[in-house]
Structures are given as structure tokens and as C-alpha cells.
Amino acid sequence: MTTTTTPNYEHLTIEEKWQQRWKQHNDWAADERTDRPKYYVLEMLPYPSGRLHMGHIRNYSIGDALARYKRMRGMNVLHPMGWDAYGLPAENAAIKNQVHPRKWTLDNIAYMKGQFERFGFSYDWRKEISTCEPEYYRWNQWLFLKMLERGLAYRKNSRVNWCPACQTVLANEQVVEGCCWRHETTPVEQKELEQWFFRITAYADALLEDMKELQDWPERVLAMQRNWIGKSVGARIQFNVSGLQEAITVFTTRVDTIYGATAVVLAPEHPLIGKLVQGVPGGESILARIKELIARRPVSTAGDTEKEGLFLGRFAVNPFSGDQIPIWVANFVLMEYGTGAVMSVPAHDQRDFEFSQKYRLPVRVVVQPPKKKLDGMFLEEAFVEYGVLVNSGPFTGLTSEQALQKMTAYAEQKGFGKPETTYRLKDWGISRQRYWGTPIPVVYCKQCGIVPVPYDQLPVLLPDNVQITGLGHSPLRDVPEFLNTACPKCQGPAERETDTMDTFVDSSWYFYRYTSPHFREAPVDPAAVNYWFPIDQYIGGIEHAILHLIYSRFFAKVLRDLGLVKTGEPVARLFTQGMVIKDGAKMSKSKGNLVDPDDMVAKYGADTTRMYVLFAAPPEKDLEWSDKGVEGIHRFVSRVYRYASRCAPELRSVPAGAPAGKELSGEDKKILRKLHQTIRRITQDFEGRWHFNTDISALMELVNLLYELDGQISKPVLRQTLETFIKLLSPFAPFLAQELWEEFGHTEDLLRVPWPDFDAALAKEEEIEIPVQINGRLRSKILAREGVSQDELEEQALADPRIAHMIAGHRVMKVIVVPSKLVNIVISEHGR
RNA sequence: GCUGGAGUGGCGGAACUGGCAGACGCACCAGACUCAAAAUCUGGCGGCCCUUGUGGUCAUGGGGGUUCGACUCCCCCCUCCAGCACCA
């Protein structure tokens, strides 16, 4: 190749040029009126915090590579983006900077949209949604009303998690190690409040069962959800209280151990405690001590909290054995789970064992392991496994498995128990004492009580004119023109609900709205949603494995039951990318280890940044950021540009591809072979494992070979190679690819260009190097024709001088020939 | 504790169904170009040993096993990460 002046890779010039062109004519739009197969690829929408961070860039670089690939494969791709625009930071910013949350949010959206453009992510912006717009949130309200009608939204007085920093209620899922998920050092407090709840527990079993459909979800996400739902199968058993007309109900998964119960233990908040201590000597002081127990208890009790309890002075009757056993109260029994009461079986439950050791309660072994004999007197820890029952009346001799069945059936037959399944999952509290969220569409009337806002009055608009203090109650309480309204039923004076919805409501169904963002009759246009759903590929961070992804699955089932959508699972395939780490910690403002995407674009360009985040690690693993690594990719990108744009002027007048009927040179064959191997590798990877890091390696190998063979490849073959290479590059570095495409004389958007097919014949090596092993150790290599027969290969291996020398004097026991792979000769150790 | 995942050169990582361990990149070393430097291009680069070779040997967290052959499969153990955690 003649050396003219080597053009420099000016990433800013190239990228700005294509940003302008792409903005002018959007070629990225999806189209429902087509017979091409549909593909819905979705990345989790960002909160408009102000700027995108590297985690976003990683997420969107993965999704965009896929979207571009699928378009080139001829699919009709829906690739939308939007804004999870409600939420607390907007209010915090309002307090800090005296700027209205709406303005702050919209400004951020405008800036971040610019960032998306700078990165060349191919979104169909006609589908854009923003959850803080009435056009969107009115459907939150609509869905709320539908759920209210079906009893899936309800109001109850409950103890709620209260974050003193946010001054608001938190869902259980938003409490992390006893602290607020946003304020990791602020302990969450408990408060009694009237709250709105979504009855997600009605779908607990469906959420668990339907996981069978989620074959293409990562195992760890399913495991986390399974854990969170926390199904456990057991029984409810009633213990009558001696001398009172009362019974205590316990939940247990181990009825088989009930003959070993030595106490009934209640949670300190158990409602029966008052009645139980009545008439007991010292009852008042017992109540006082229980109050202290509650006060002393840490916000979140863990397994290592010292067990504390006290005897209530009453006894209960074991319905199986008739034994009188003491009733205690203890800090380790949770009111929120099961019935708030347990039977204490020290021999077969570690917690009960520790409790009984401290308070000198007896230990009675009723289940024996298969081999040893346990004695309650000398037990050092509870035996918690299944075994064979002893000292258990008529059930003695049964295995635990048998006993669980028979004893539950017996309890049911006698009327003091029944089988029960409990879940850890709790209903979802959605009320927030906050301004920047969806108003909950109900009215409180002195005459009529809770009155839903009629559908034709939706949306209940969020007023703009508010004073945000960040303290106490919802700011909406101080807006009289919002607060005061007429009761829709009796027209009398009434007050609006002033709490707003948890923003997780917004993000639980947004992906349906993308299919018809301006539809006015319902949350979704049935035709559009049924065409696009389910989402073929959803991509996002692992941090959403529980909250967002369980709520979304719950909403999918509700929407299905409302007849709005057909499928009960919205996401066919889920991909969770790893975090972006720097200096050993997740990038964050507080750690001061942020790398700003804008800085990277300015310094190296969007293509380099995109390629780096794909190259540095496989997408599902955490990525350790390295400034040097970015430079490495930038070198590669520049190298590509220099080579291709140097060749382009000369090649654009040459026909692409090898002339028919003409024998190719060795170099031509070599480069075409590498090219087709690369096509195969990248294509298979997009269809399978998504190890984009190795795809980029493959592109590097191809470029290395181009440099090695510089000047030795015929022009038509070189043109074909480079043009194909540009297509392969385009999902990863769209600006550079498009620029080079133009330099080769093409005008169409690369997304309209078909993805290259690989030719298996061309990809095939003519001559392959076959390793020859002796007794499994590599001893030599031979060159063989591709497709050589097993016998020939064996013969060739045995004839190799090195091999022949080494096997001389040994007996060849066996020769293993793996076609096109290897030969292993097994010989006797000594010369026999 | 339970659940899920991961341990490979100085570093990020590769090896897809058991078949040449270390692709590709970073860092480093050397050479070319240059007055010089940067950039660029070329070459080298797991450890140890020797007779320096088309050499030997060790090596994928540790120990055992299956196999002609194990980073890959099986058993036991160690370490790290993540989620849940007094859930009865």
C-alpha cells in the first residue's frame, strides 16, 4: 500500500459530525407495520440525577451493541429510553438550591439526553417517556384505582419503617441492614401510620411458581427472589392456656418435634400478653419489663443478639402430649412473621436451645439421628435434622417426614391445627410523605369515608406551587387548593390524600408504556403491547434483582388479570451486568472514585469509551476501571482508523471481493480465512454468551494480521475484508464504523446494512497443526491437511521423527486420535 | 448459618460440548525511526533447571478420584464476593 499522509484519528470531529446527522434523521425507529420479526431490547431507565455514570454507560453499551446487531440481522427492533423522573433527590436539590423539583428534573433530563446522543446510543426517541409527566402518571393513578376495586390496594394502620433523614416511610425492601437504602448510616425508626399497601402477597405463590418460566434469567437473581419470597410449609397449632378461655396459635415447620416443646414463646408485641398477665401476681411489673425489652431491642435483631425473655406466670397445654408448659415472652420471636408465637423445642432448634440454656429450661430429645443416641442432658447444640421420633406417644418410631404428615393431619382432625404455608414477603407499602411523586387518587370525606377519584377526573395533577421544607408531613398538606376538594359522591367538603406513591410504582410497568407512549384510552394500547411483548432482552444492574424485578413481575400479573396484557411474565431474558469498580470500590461520589463519561468522550471519544467498557471484562462480571486500559483501546481504535482511511481512497474504486475463477494468493486466503473466522466468532457470540471482550479481541487479531500482511493483499480482497470488518465493528464503535463506511463510498446508515454471513469453507484452515502427545504429554506437532482421515493422522503421527525416536523400544498400547484436534499415543512405561 | 457465584502470569482476562493452559490487552524489556523525546512500527515477556533445544520440568486456591488425557467432570477442604439472616 502506498504511503500517503497518514490521517489522524480526530474522534471529536468524527463523532460530532455523526451526532448531527443522526439527530436530523432518526433511522432507529421501530415499526409495527412490518413482517420482520420483532425484537424488544430494553435497558433499565435511569433516574435523572444530573449526569450518566460509568455504570449507565456499561449498561447502555451492552444494550446498544445488541440492538445494532439485531437490526443488522434484519429484525424490527424496539429500543426505547425514558426517565424514572420522580423521586427524592429532586426535592433535596429543591431545598438546597431553591430550584423547583420539576425544573431541576427537566434540566437534568435535557443534559442527560445530550449525553445519550454523545454516546451514539440508538434509541427510538419517539417512544420516550418521563414518569413525572401527567400523561404517564395518570396511568399510575388509573392502575391504583383498578387495584383498589380488586382489593389489591388497601389502607391499614401499621408500623412502618421511617427514615428520619428522608422524613418518609420506606418499604421493607428499602431497608438495608436496619438503615435507609439512601442514608446507609441512618438507622430506620418504627412509626405507626395509616398507609396504602399493594397486596403483593396475593401473588406470592404465583411469583414463586412462575419462576419456572424464567429459564433465561440468571440463577442468582432467581435465588435472591426465592429467598425474598421465603416460602415455608408447616402447620398452625393451637395451645390452650390453662385457667383461661384463650389459646395461643404458633406456626411451626417441625410439628414432628412437638413432644419436645418445653415452652410457648411470644413476641413482645403479641396482642394476647395483656390478657395473659391479668390476675398473675406481679403482672404490672411483667408488662413494664416487656416494654423495656422492646425499647432495648435493636432496630434490626440479628442471630447474634443476646436472647432475653421472661416467664409470664401462665402455662399452656401441649395439645399432643397434654403437658403443661410455661408461657414466655422473648426478644427473638418476631411479631411480623408467622403468628408471632412459637413453640420452643430446645433439642431440635438452635435458638430454642440457646434460650433454654440461659433460662435453665429442660431439653427433651424427641428425634434421634440414625446412628448415635442423643441425650438431652448432655446436648451441646440442637439436632436440627430429620430423624426417627422417640418419646412421641403414638407417633414414636415414625420418620420425621412421615410424622410431619401424620401429625398435621391428626391436629386438623382433632381441630387444634391445620397445615399452613407462610411467606417472608410482605405487602408493599406505597405511601410516601413526599411531594415529588404521583398523587394517590383518593379523597377523604367526613360523610362517605374513603372515596376513589372517578376515572374521568384523572389525572389528579400534582400542583406546582408548593413549599418544600423536607420536614414531617407531605408538602401537599400545605397547599389548600390541592387539599380541599368536593367529595365525588356527596359533593360535600372533603380532603385529598396528600401522600404520593413510591417511585417504584412508576418503574414497575413503564416498559409497557414504551409500546404506545401517547395512547389516551388506557395505560397500554393492546395491539402494540401484544405485538412487542414479552421483552426479548432486559439488561440492568444486579442491584435491582429484588425490588424492581419483583414489583415488575407483580404488576405484570395484575395487568394480565385486568386483561391489559397477555403474559404474566414481562421479561423473557434478563441480563445483569457487573458493577464498575475503581480502586477496589464501586464508583460513587462519596468515594471520590468517579470517572466522568463526558471527560472520557472529550479525551478519547465515545467509541473508545464504549469499547473499553465492553473489552475490560465479560459483561456479567465486575469491571475494574483502568486508565491505562482505556489508552490501550484508544490505540486500537486509532490504529483501525489510520489503516482503513489510508486504504479507502484507493480501494473505493475497486470492486469488492475476489474475482471469480481466479486463484487466490496465499495472503489473500489467509486474510479471508481470518475474516470469516472472525465473523463466525462474533456472530455466535451475539447469539450466545455475549462475551464482547473476546469479540473485541477477535477484531484486534484481525487488525494485527492486516498490519502483518500490509501490502501483500490484493485490492479487491482487501476492500472486502475492510468493509466486512467495519460492519463487525459497528455495534461496538458506531461512529468510527459509520465514518469509515462513508470513506468507502457508502451513504446508507450501517443499521440498514445486512450483517455479514460467514462462509464455512473460507473459514476453514487448509493445513492444521496437530499436537501429538505421548502418555498425555505434548511431545511434538505435525502438520496435516484439514479433513484428513483418522488412520492417516495416526500414521503421520507415528512417522514423525521425534515421536518415532521417543517410542522406539516401547510398546504402543493404544493410539487416541481426535479428528482435527490431537493424537495421543499411549506407550508402556518401560521398554517391554 | 442459609442461598448463589468466583478463585488461571505483575494486572484485566482467554481456553464454548474433557483434547496444545495463558488468546487479546495493560505493564515491563529490547530494537527501528528521531538531534532528542513523544507518537508509531517490530520483536520479547508464567516459574524453575540444564547439555540453550524442535530441551526438561513444575504450574489454573489445596487434597483426593474418574480418564489415554482434567482450568473443565466427581468427592472433601480453604479463601473471597454478593444476597438473605433469631423467618420458628
Image: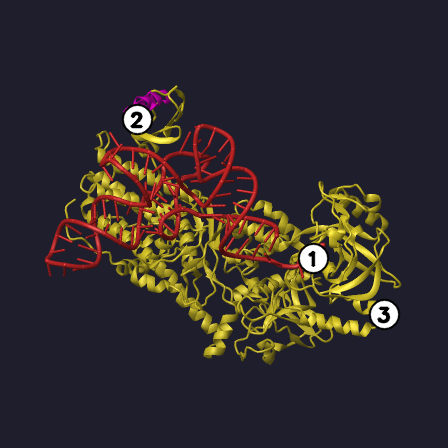
User: Numbered disc 3: what chain?
Assistant: A
Q: In this view, does A491 lie above or below A602?
A: below
User: Numbered disc 2: what chain?
Assistant: A
Q: Are marks 3 and 2 in contact (CB under 8 Å)?
A: no
Q: Which residue is drawn at 36% across and 45% down?
A: A695
| Inter-mark Cα distance, 3 to 2 | 96 Å
Q: Which residue is drawn at 30% across and 51% down?
A: A737
The rendered magenta stretch, by its main secondary structure, is classed as helix
Mark in front: 3 vs 2:
3
Mark in front: 1 vs 2:
1
The residue carrying mark 1 is A351
Residue A750: x percent and y percent? 33, 49
Looking at the rendered image, the quarter that the C terminus of chain A falls into is top left
Q: Can residue A658 be seen in this snapshot?
A: no
Q: Do labels 3 and 1 share a chain?
A: yes
Tell me: A37 left or right of A453. left
